[in-house]
Structures are given as structure tokens and as C-alpha cells.
């Protein structure tokens, strides 16, 4: 379902009916026949319950009072038939409602995840992932509970109550009127308690989601927790949240359960008054007891649906809070979407051009300022600069994780703001500095680069990324599970798998964010050699912190505080000893070739054989 469709029937903060209308509008048609079955079963349960109360009158009068033996079989058959119908109908409604509820939970879980995937990176930067996951899992049950409570309260409890009240009025109108006097105070108590619960329930949901999220984050970061001996501190913080959650839940219990003594007292008063009056009529006025027994049975049976109806409103408040919070998430519009007239990007050579780009995560503090440069097609462009200069931001803008504030970015002459994000990103392969692997096997994680890749292509990409050897040493080879976040692999192994994932993508544009930073010297040398072949013919943008990895790039741009201050080749930039690039190089204290050595080797060997030889020695020593 699209974001635009999900915005229909907006939730009003104080209207249960608005949420129910929205749920039914979105799901009612698909479940209509299951609802028909469930409602029919519930009506049978309600009807047989009322029949049980009604049949008490002929049973008492004709069997016990008039002593008619011929009626025993018929009355017992009627009672047994009602019991059988009620049993099977109860089973049918329970199974039907469970199927609807389980499907609703699965549907909204999938829908919530689909919508989360449409939201921009900015949303996830501002939202704790653990808390978000826990909140979604807890809130999604509110949709199911709201529908289930509404259906059972209307089709079973309300109908049962009406039918039983009908039996009571039929048997004795005067007693019925007196017993119904408990209704107004019970309704007042429900309204009062509901108002008290509304705010507490929302606080409880938020606290519980925060607690679950904190536990999830602590387990995901267990290595850091252990390394910095944070066990006691995190246990203390989570303990505080658990205590707070306990206090809120206890408060909910105290407020919600106030309805029990109120309803018990009011119900006890009504039943006591009826018993006293009916006893007086039987003993003093000599009336047959059948109608009184039938009335009392109906009154006692009506007590349960009346009590459930009173508690339904209390239960619906918590379900409503959860349902509202799911819709608050689903109603979030992506801040950065495709333009209405966006077209598919057609990337062939992969030339990248930044045209006077200005961007800031906050409007008052730009990260990039009037940035203009061209990454030539099929060439290697290196981006260097101090931390905070805007290098990673530039790569994020190229992938349209964010939209520029001013200026434009073009790929093969196409403004990326006017093409679909999906088609643009399919033309880009990205290797992050911090590799991330998903749940599944090593083969699965490499195939995420291109889902149509064959096993042979996956293994070839692994060889190019110097990963094939260690993969085959794993217990199940390429089919070895990587654990949560790739925890069963070392940092360097995870990085090589992520490089293989980028290789198998076969995209015309390759983005490398310090791609070999997690590798040891031997693996780095092997991956550099492999990447040199991968980068041939591709537009490659390398973000570098170690200048030794970019000295032979086709083009180097130097950023400072978001501005392009220098650009050129390594030789031209080093020719000016006062340049920022030369100062960086002196600070790092080494001159070596890196990722792009072999790409440039053929171009530089004829012109500068001596530096080429020295550079090769440097690489061999580092290996």
C-alpha cells in the first residue's frame, strides 16, 4: 500500500471509531467471509445462552412443579442441543478470529517494514533501531486486539446481553426494570476509568518499547559492553527502566481493576434484591417458581457479558494506543521521495558531476559549500580531507540518501533528482568503511549485490576480493551462516565479503569508503590488486584517509570544511609544498601506492620508471 493510500481516514486522537473505520477500510473486504462465519458463530453462542435461561421456566414448572414426566426428554434434548451448538459455535468463532488476528499481525508487520524501507536515512539517524523494532512488534498487536475486542463485544457479549435482558423482561418486567438500575453507575465508572487509563497506557507502551530496544542494543553491542566493562552500568540503567515499566503496569492494573469491585458490588446488589423480592412472591403470594428461576438464571448469565462489556472499553484503550502508534508510523511521509515525473536512470559510462552543491543536515550549518567537480567516466577520482570535511556526505548525496539544498548532481548528464532512486542505486556499487553483513550465509550476503548472480559469479567475485580461500575453510564453505551482523567472521573477513558483494553488482560506478581499512597487510595487498582490475572501465570514487592509497588516482580533490580547495594529480598537488595536500602527505609521513597502483601502472611506468619501482617495493613491504 502506498504512503498516499495509508494517509486516508486519518486517526483522530480521541475517536476509537476513526481507527476502527480505517482498519476495516483497509482490511474488511479480504476478511468479509471469515467475519460472516465468526459473527454467525457468535450469534449462535448468544442465542443458545439466552435459550438456556429461557428453558429454565418450563423445566422448573413442568418437571418439578407440575411433575410432567413426558417433558423430561424434550427439555433435556433442548438443553443438550443448545450445549452442542454453543460448543461448536464457540470453537468456530475462536478459530476464525484467531486466523484473522494472526493474518492482521503478519500483514501489518510486513506493511510496517515496507514503509520503513521507504523512509529516508534521516529518519533512521534520528530513531533508535532497537526501540523502533521493539515498538513495532508490540504495537502491531493493537490492530488485532482492537478488531477482536470490537467483534466479540458486539456480536457475542452485546447480543447475549440483549437476548438475556429480553428473557428477563419476558419473564418479569418489574424485576427487569429494577435490576437494570445498576447500568448508569456502571457506565459512569467505565468512563472514569477509561479516561485515567488513556495516558497511562501510552506511557507504558513507550517505556516497554524503550526497555526492549535497550536490551536488543546491549546484546548487539556485547563486544563493546564486555571490552569497556559496562555490564554493571547497563544492568543498572535497564533495571531502572524495568522498575519504571513495572510501576506503570502496576498503576494500569490498579486503575483497570477498580472496575471489578464496582461491578461486583452493583451486580451483587441487583441479584440480592431480585432474590429477596422473588422469594417474597413465591412464599407469600404462592406464584410458581419457574418464571423466577428463569429470570434469575438470565440475570446471572447476563452478569458475565455485562462485566466483559464494561472491561472491553478498558482493554480497548490499550489496543487503541498501540494501533494509533502503528498508524503514526505508517502516516510518516518520506521527506525525500522520487519526483512525480521521475524516470529510470540510464547509466552507461558513469560520469559524475557535482554542480555548485550546498548541503547541510541542519539548515544553519552546511556541510558542503558550493562544491563543484567532475569524476570522469572510467577514471579513478580520490577525495581526501580532514575528518568532518564532508567526504562521506558527498558519497551519501551521490546515492541520494539525502537531497541537496542547492545545486545539482549529474550522472551521465542526468540530474539524479529527476530519476528514480532505485534505478540510480542499481548503477552504484558501494563498499563502506564499516562492513555490515545480514543474517544468512556467506553466499547470501555476496548475492545481495545482485540477486540474479549465479553461484559461479559469486565465487569469482570472492576470489577477486581475496575471500575465496578463507570462505572455503569455513565449516560449510559458502553456505556457512555468518551470525548476527557477521559476528562469526573477523573484521577483515567481513570487509572482503562486502567487497565481493560490490564486485558481483557489476555496476558502472564504484564507491570505496576506505575499503581496505579493516584488512591486514597481506590481505590489503591482495585486495588492492583485485580492485585494480575491478576498477578498470568503471567510474571509481575513493574516499581516502591514508594518502598512500590514492597517489596514482587520475584525479584528486581536496576538501576543507565542505569546500573544494585543491584538485589535480598527486604530482601537481605535491609540486606546491604549501598545498594542503602536500601538508597532509608530510603529516602522514609516507609516500606509497595503494588501491589504484595497478590501474595506473601501465600509464606511469613509461614516464616515471624509478618512482614506479620504488612504489612497487613499498607495496611489497606493506604486504
Image (cartoon, grey):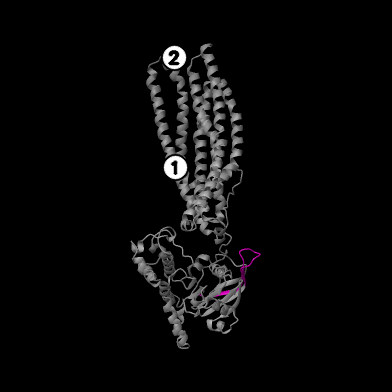
Q: Which stretch did the figure color magenta?
A: 350-369
Residue 418 found in image quarter: bottom right
Q: Quadrant of the C terminus?
A: bottom left
Image spot of residue 396 (x, y percent): 54, 67
Q: Secondary structure at mark 1?
A: helix
382 and 407: which one is in front?
382
Tell me if mark 1 has few (under 14), some (14-19) or many (20+) residues whose alpha carbon lies within 10 angstroms of its own.
some
417 and 375: which one is in front?
375
Residue under pointer 1: 98
**Residue at 51% of width from left, 58% of height from top?**
117
Q: Is residue 471 visible?
A: yes
Please say if 595 is above or below 161: below
Please say if 64 is above or below 499: above
The label shown at residue 470 is: none
Q: Secondary structure at mark 2?
A: helix
Residue 74 found in image quarter: top left
Please say if 151 is above or below 186: below
345 and 588: which one is in front?
588
Residue under pointer 2: 65
**Residue at 50% of width from left, 36% of height from top?**
155
Q: Is residue 456 visible?
A: no
Tell me if mark 2 has few (under 14), some (14-19) or many (20+) residues whose alpha carbon lies within 10 angstroms of its own.
few
**Alpha carbons under labels 2 and 1: distance apart:** 45 Å
Q: Earlier in the sequence, mark 2 or mark 1?
A: 2
Amino acid at each position: 500500500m502506498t504512503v498516499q493510500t495509508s494517509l486516508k481516514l486519518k486517526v483522530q486522537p480521541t475517536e476509537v471509531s476513526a481507527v476502527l473505520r480505517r482498519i476495516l477500510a483497509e482490511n474488511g473486504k479480504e476478511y468479509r467471509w471469515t467475519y460472516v462465519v465468526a459473527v454467525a458463530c457468535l450469534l449462535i453462542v448468544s442465542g443458545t445462552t439466552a435459550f438456556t435461561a429461557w428453558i429454565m421456566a418450563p423445566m422448573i414448572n413442568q418437571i418439578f412443579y407440575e411433575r410432567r414426566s413426558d417433558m423430561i426428554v424434550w427439555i433435556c434434548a433442548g438443553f443438550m442441543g443448545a450445549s452442542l451448538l454453543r460448543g461448536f459455535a464457540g470453537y468456530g468463532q475462536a478459530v476464525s478470529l484467531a486466523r484473522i488476528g494472526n493474518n492482521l499481525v503478519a500483514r501489518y508487520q510486513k506493511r510496517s517494514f515496507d514503509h520503513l524501507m521507504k523512509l529516508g536515512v534521516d529518519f533512521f539517524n534520528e530513531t533508535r533501531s532497537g526501540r523502533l523494532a521493539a515498538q513495532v512488534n508490540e504495537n502491531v498487536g493493537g490492530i488485532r486486539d482492537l478488531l477482536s475486542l470490537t467483534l466479540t463485544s458486539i456480536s457475542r457479549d452485546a447480543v447475549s446481553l440483549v437476548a438475556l435482558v429480553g428473557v428477563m423482561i419476558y419473564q418479569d418486567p418489574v424485576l427487569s426494570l429494577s435490576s437494570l438500575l445498576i447500568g448508569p453507575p456502571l457506565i459512569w465508572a467505565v468512563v472514569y476509568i477509561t479516561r485515567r487509563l488513556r495516558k497511562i497506557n501510552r506511557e507504558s507502551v513507550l517505556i516497554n518499547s524503550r526497555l526492549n530496544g535497550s536490551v536488543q542494543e546491549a546484546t548487539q553491542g556485547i563486544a563493546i559492553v564486555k571490552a569497556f566493562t559496562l555490564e554493571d552500568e547497563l544492568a543498572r540503567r535497564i533495571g531502572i527502566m524495568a522498575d519504571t515499566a513495572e510501576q506503570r503496569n502496576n498503576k494500569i492494573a490498579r486503575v483497570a481493576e477498580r472496575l471489578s469491585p464496582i461491578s461486583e458490588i452493583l451486580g451483587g446488589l441487583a441479584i440480592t434484591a431480585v432474590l429477596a423480592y422473588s422469594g417474597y412472591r413465591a412464599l407469600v403470594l404462592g406464584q410458581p417458581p419457574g418464571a423466577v428461576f428463569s429470570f434469575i438464571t438470565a440475570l446471572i448469565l447476563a452478569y458475565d457479558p455485562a462485566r466483559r462489556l464494561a472491561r472491553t472499553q478498558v482493554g480497548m484503550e490499550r489496543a487503541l494506543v498501540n494501533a494509533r502508534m502503528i498508524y503514526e508510523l505508517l502516516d510518516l511521509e518520506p521527506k525525500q521521495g522520487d519526483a512525480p515525473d521521475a524516470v529510470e536512470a540510464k547509466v552507461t559510462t558513469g560520469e559524475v558531476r557535482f554542480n555548485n552543491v550546498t548541503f547541510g543536515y541542519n539548515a544553519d550549518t552546511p556541510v558542503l559549500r558550493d562544491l563543484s567537480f567532475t569524476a570522469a567516466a572510467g577514471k579513478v577520482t580520490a577525495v581526501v580531507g580532514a575528518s568532518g570535511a564532508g567526504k562521506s556526505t558527498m558519497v551519501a548525496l551521490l546515492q541520494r540518501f539525502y537531497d541537496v539544498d542547492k545545486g545539482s548532481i549529474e550522472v551521465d548528464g542526468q540530474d539524479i533528482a529527476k530519476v528514480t532512486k532505485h534505478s540510480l542505486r542499481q548503477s552504484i556499487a558501494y563498499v563502506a568503511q564499516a562492513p555490515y553483513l545480514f543474517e544468512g550465509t556467506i553466499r547470501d550476503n555476496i548475492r545481495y549485490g545482485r540477486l540474479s548472480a549465479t553461484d559461479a559469479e559469486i565465487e569469482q567475485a570472492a576470489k577477486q576480493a581475496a575471500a575465496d580461500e578463507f570462505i572455503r575453510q569455513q565449516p560449510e564453505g559458502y553456505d556457512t551462516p555468518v551470525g548476527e551482523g557477521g559476528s562469526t567472521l573477523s573484521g577483515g573477513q567481513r570487509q572482503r565479503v562486502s567487497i565481493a558483494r560490490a564486485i558481483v553488482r557489476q555496476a558502472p560506478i564504484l564507491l570505496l569508503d576506505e575499503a581496505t581499512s579493516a584488512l591486514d597487510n597481506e590481505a590489503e595487498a591482495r585486495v588492492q590488486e583485485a580492485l585494480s582490475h575491478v576498477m578498470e572501465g568503471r567510474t571509481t570514487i575513493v574516499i581516502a584517509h591514508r594518502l598512500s592509497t590514492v597517489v596514482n588516482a587520475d584525479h584528486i580533490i581536496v576538501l576543507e570544511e565542505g569546500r573544494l580547495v585543491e584538485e589535480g594529480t598527486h604530482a601537481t598537488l605535491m609540486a606546491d609544498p604549501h598545498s594542503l595536500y602536500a601538508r597532509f602527505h608530510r603529516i602522514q609521513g609516507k609516500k606509497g601506492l595503494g588501491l589504484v597502483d595497478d590501474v595506473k601502472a601501465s600509464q606511469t611506468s613509461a614516464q616515471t620508471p624509478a618512482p614506479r619501482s620504488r612504489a612497487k617495493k613499498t607495496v611489497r613491504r606493506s604486504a
